[in-house]
Structure formats: structure tokens, C-alpha cells
Amino acid sequence: MSFREPLLLLGLALIPLALFAYVAAQRRRRRFAVRYTNVDVLASVAARAGWARHIPAALALAALAALVVALARPERTVAAEQNAATVVMVTDTSGSMLARDVRPDRLTAAKAAARALADELPRDFRLGLVTFGSSVSQLVEPTTDKARAIAAIDGLQVHGATAMGDGLALGLEAARSRVDVGRGLRRRLPAALLLLSDGANTTGDADPITVAERARRLRVPVYTVALGTQGGYLEHMQPDGSTTREPVPPDRQTLQEIARETRGRFYEAAAVQRLKEIYSGLGTRLATRMEKQEVTAAFAGGALALLLAGMAAGLIRGGRLP
């Protein structure tokens, strides 16, 4: 829970002051009571009153606390349905995507998962596709035509090294593009990036972490997926007919840092089914946004209810207000 006017919470300091004043009043009342000569009658009255005589005052103090919190305008974070947004898939198509530690191979698994994401996104969401290998390409600009995105996904092929930073930068640019919202108006929609990679950044001009810092300033979260296992490898045929293995583990540390920096989320996928589950779940997750909802009325209503309860308790017990 957060507050729009947090400085007003300093008013809670009145609670211990009021409690101190109440305790002092009770002690002063006991001093006056000692002067009463009929001690037996006084003892019987005090026994009947017991701790219950403090209920009205306790309810009044609780009402005061609730009222101070209400004045600070408390807010809670809730999930709200998002009617329109932009999602850009930034997908690794470097040579390591041919590794077979994810069956049948990493690229085929990535294609299947991307199709699942396209199916899960709401109809009015715009989906774009950026790929990166030795170079980067925007195959599909953000569009509501999911068929175009799926066709581009099906045609993905591997090529070269891993320009992760350049791919992330192009994806961020695509996510920030203005779209036509009718009546001649163009504006930027809420956006998110989905970065899938199976290796470390090995080429290109942009540093992935630097791009992530820019995405954070622009409030574009990046959800990252590390595809493959730490034992993944590529086999290369040598001129003499022998084969060598090239390790191609995913760069989990960089992907975790990108997600953390942009307030996204990091995932690991070592199997095609797990990757599909991640993408399908993200489709649902991205369809909602977290927003703050003011709950001042609830605390103000609680304060009123406590105050009325205290008044009722005081009238019932002693025929007077607390």
C-alpha cells in the first residue's frame, strides 16, 4: 500500500499522545476515588466496570487512526484489464539457435512459443517482431494483424553471431512508435518487450544493459527468456571428418540484469513445453496492467464506523459519550 500524501501520516503521532492523556485522566480519577469513604461500594462498582469501561476510548482512538490514514489518501495496486498495448518480440536468430538441447532445436521451439503468444494476446494488442543475429531486422512493425506476425515467425532462419544490444535497441524503438488511434490522432501505447536469447552479446554497437537503462527511463518493461541449457552445444564437422563441440550456454546473468533493470521478469526455458507455457502466460500477463486505486473512502468509512461504535458503547455503559 502507498499514499498520495504520506506526510499526513505524521498525524498518527497524535495517537500515543491521546493514549497518554487518557491514561493520565484515569490515574487522576483513581486519586479522587480514594477520597470516597465507602470503599466496599467503590470496589463493587470498579469490579463491575472492569476492562470493558475502556472499550469506548479504544474505539475512539482506532477511529482517529483510521481517519489520519484516510487523510493521507491510501492507494492499493490492482490488476486492470488493458484494452490496447504494444508487444514487441525481440528474438535471437544467431547460429547457436540450431543447438538441439531443446528439442527438436532451439529455433523451432522459439517459433512454436511465439505462435502461442500471438494466439493469447488480445485482439486489439499490437504485436511486432525484431530479430537479431550478426545484424538486426524488424520483420513486422507492431500490428493488430496477428497473421502477418505468425507468417514472419514461421519464416525465421538463423544467421551469424549475437547482436543482442542492437536487437533490443531496435525493439525499443518499435515499441515507442506512435500509432493511429482514430480521428487523425496518433499516440504511444503502453508497451513491453519480450527478449529471447540463447547466448551472450558478441557483436553490434549497443550494450544490452545500456539499452535496458533507457527502457527503464521510458517505462518499457523487458521480459527476458534464457533459452537452452548450460550444457548446450553445436557440432562442427572438421576437414578430416571428425567433429568438435562448441558450447553455447545462454547468458543468464545479462538477461536477469535486463529484466531487473526494466522491472520486467526473467524466465528460463530448457524444453519446448516450458517455453510455450512462458509465452502463453505472458500473453495473459500483458493483457493486464497494474494500476493504483485510491481506497480513502474505505478508511474514512471505517473511521466513522469505529466512532459510532464507540459512541454506542459509551451510551450503553454509562449513558454518556466516551
Image: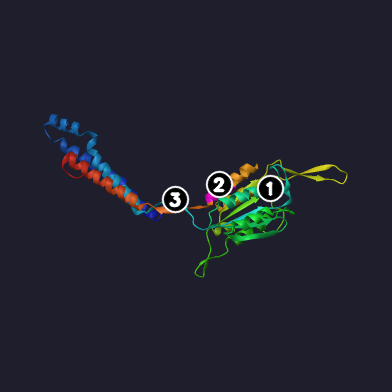
Q: Is residue 180 left or right of residue 241?
A: left
> Which residue is labeled 3 in the image?
77
Dot 3: within a 10 Å radius of its alpha carbon, few (fewer than 14), some, or many (20 or more) residues? few
Between the residue at mark 3 and the residue at mark 1, the CA separation in whole angstroms equals 38 Å
Q: Is residue 297 left or right of residue 79?
A: left
> Which residue is labeled 2 in the image?
281
Assess whether residue 276 is covered by the magenta stretch: no
All told, the count of numbered labels is 3
> Which residue is labeled 1 in the image?
108
Residue 65 vs 181, above or below: the answer is above
Dot 1 falls on a residue whose secondary structure is: helix
Q: Nearer the viewer, residue 168 or 71?
A: 168
Counting residues from the start of the chain, the first of labels 2 and 1 encountered is 1
Dot 3 falls on a residue whose secondary structure is: strand
Residue 279 seen anywhere in this rendered image of the structure: yes
Query: Residue 250's x, y, as percent?
Result: 68, 46
Q: Residue at x 14, y 30 (%)?
A: 39
Disc 1 residue type? Thr
The quarter of the displayed image where residue 212 is located: bottom right
Which contiguous range is marked in magenta?
279-285
Query: Residue 191's x, y, as percent?
Result: 55, 57
Between the residue at mark 2 and the residue at mark 1, the CA separation in whole angstroms equals 19 Å
